[in-house]
Image (cartoon, rainbow, N blue to C red):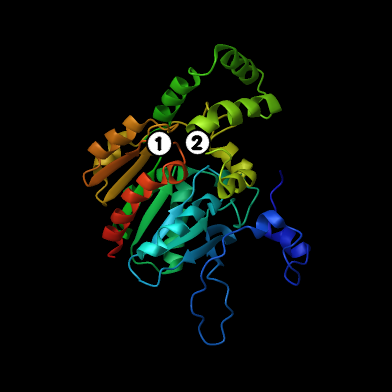
Amino acid sequence: MRQLSRRDLLDAGLAATSLGSLPTLAQAATLPARPARSGEIHTGGARMIPISGNQHVWVKPVLSGHGGIPVLTLHGGPGFPHFYFECFEDFLPQAGISYWYYDQLGCGFSDQPKDSSLWTIERFTTEVEEVRAALGFDRMVLLGHSWGGLLCLEYALKYPKRLAGMVVSNMTASTDSYLRYLAVLRKRLPPDTLRRLEELEAAGSYDSSEYEKIMFEELYPKYVCRINPWPEPVARAVRFLAEPVYNAIQGKSEFEVTGSMRGWDRWNDLHRIRAPTLLLGGEHDEINPDDMREMARRIPNAAVTICDQGSHLAMYDDQARYFAALIPFLKRVTGK
């Protein structure tokens, strides 16, 4: 499905009309408006902020009214928009925790340039720092999920003085670790299904309906989100996956990394991370929960919670356990 850019919206005349013709985009987060300065138009806090290369990325706050060190969310994918973080609205503001949505470049409501050389770990890490500076945060807490967890680790190593704490949710410390565990999980498929999956991969048929059927019916319901049907924000995020970003960083297949994330490894650098860290995983995750336990042993000031019923989206399929660990940690590192 082709994504709608800001140019599409302008061409459609949406500046002067309703969003009724775009029901999927109309489902985007509606958040509490912050008090406007004199003469300022209320936007609910959503805005585009400039980054390098004359590009702009979209951010929006969910404010609790209680202050504290801000929390910036880093979505996964790579290439998903922020939408699936919307479940946080039912937990964090009520606990007095403010946080920010942020669509990384190429994703969601942010600019979507066609330059594939932009989709690197290094540039996205720099982008996170540019967002911090543009928002005027002296220090911040990062909450990264999956690919966003990778960016947390990279940011913690490159900009330690700007980090008051971080949450690494459902991510391991190397690409090879990720692929090794996926190889274990795929062997649990029925023999005929596994054989057909291998045939499709050998033929390069990653976009075929048959390949997608195996992924969405045999693997994702077990290891990505165990709720049936998937919650609306999750389904919406999947519909608006930025495929150019995903393909450039990950590759065409979940089981083979051919993009810029290939060879990434931070296991031997975890001891250098000094920020208070919470690692969150799921026993049914596509990320090995034992990897997350080992990361907690290597990061000096880290704790780990593995959600018994959780998968890769444990914030949905094991909410009680996930938020019981997340909220006290965020209160501590944000000063609440």
Please identify the quarter of the rendering in which residue 239 is found.
top right
Left or right of 35 on screen, residue 165:
left
Check the picture and name the quadrant holding the N terminus.
Answer: top right
For label 1, the residue is: 309
- What secondary structure is marked by label 1? loop
Residue positioned most to the left: 300
Check contact, mark 2 vs mark 1: CB within 8 A: yes
- Which sits in the foreground, 254 or 288? 288
For the residue carrying disc 1, how many other residues have a C-alpha within 10 Å: few (<14), some (14-19), or many (20+)? some
Going by the numbered disc 1, the residue's amino acid type is Gln
Query: Would residue 208 be seen by someone viewing this image from the given angle?
Result: no
Question: Residue 76 appears at what percent x and percent y?
Answer: 49, 45
For label 2, the residue is: 226
- Closer to the chain start, of discs 2 and 1, is 2
Going by the numbered disc 2, the residue's amino acid type is Arg
- Which sits in the foreground, 138 or 95? 95
